[in-house]
C-alpha cells in the first residue's frame, strides 16, 4: 500500500547493480511507508542523496539505502532497503543524539 492515493500506479526507479555490488536497491522518488522495529520512537531523521538515517529516543542509530562509501556505518559498503541498527555505537556504549546525512556521508553526534 502506498502513502498517497494512486501510488500503486507509480513504479519506483531501480538502480542497476554496479560491478561487485550484490544488493539491488530500490530508489524511490516519492515518500514511502517504512516499518521500523517495534517499540522505536524516532527523535531525528536525515536524508542523504541516496541514504537515510534515524535516531531513536533510546539513542540508537538506524540507517538504510545506498552504502557504497560506507556511509551507512555498518563497517562495509553494502546497501540495504531495510533499516539496520549501527551496532558499532552500541558496542562502544555511545548514544546517538543527532544525525546529518550528506551526499555520501553520515555525521552523528553521540554521548558517552
Image (cartoon, grey):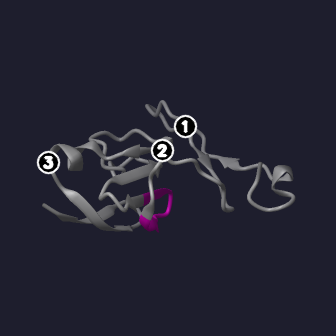
Mark 2 crowdedness (10 Å alpha carbons): few <14, some 14-19, many ≥20: few
For marks 2 and 3 on the same chain, the one whose residue lies earlier in the sequence: 2
Give the extent of the magenta segment: 43-53
Q: Label 3's element?
A: loop
For marks 1 and 2 on the same chain, the one whose residue lies earlier in the sequence: 1
- Residue under numbered circle 1: 17
- Residue under numbered circle 2: 37
Quarter of the image with the C terminus is: bottom left
- Residue under numbered circle 3: 92
Marks 2 & 3, CB-CB < 8 Å contact: no
Would residue 43 be found to the left or right of residue 38 on screen?
left
Would residue 106 be found to the left or right of residue 14 on screen?
left
Query: Which residue is painted at 46% across and 64% down in the image?
Result: 48
Q: Label 2's element?
A: loop
Query: Which residue is painted at 41% across and 47% down in the image?
Result: 67
Foreground pick, 108 / 60: 60
Gap in Å between the C-alphas at discs 2 and 3?
Answer: 22 Å
Amino acid at each position: 500500500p502506498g502513502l498517497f492515493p494512486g501510488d500503486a500506479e507509480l513504479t519506483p526507479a531501480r538502480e542497476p547493480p554496479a560491478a561487485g555490488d550484490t544488493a539491488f536497491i530500490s530508489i524511490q522518488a516519492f515518500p514511502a511507508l517504512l516499518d521500523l522495529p517495534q517499540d522505536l520512537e524516532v527523535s531525528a531523521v536525515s536524508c542523504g542523496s541516496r541514504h537515510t538515517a534515524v535516531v531513536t529516543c533510546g539513542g540508537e542509530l538506524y540507517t538504510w539505502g545506498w552504502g557504497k562509501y560506507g556511509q551507512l556505518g555498518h563497517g562495509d559498503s553494502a546497501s540495504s532497503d531495510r533499516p539496520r541498527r549501527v551496532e558499532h555505537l552500541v558496542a562502544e556504549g555511545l548514544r546517538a543524539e543527532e544525525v546529518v546525512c550528506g551526499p555520501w556521508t553520515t555525521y552523528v553526534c553521540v554521548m558517552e
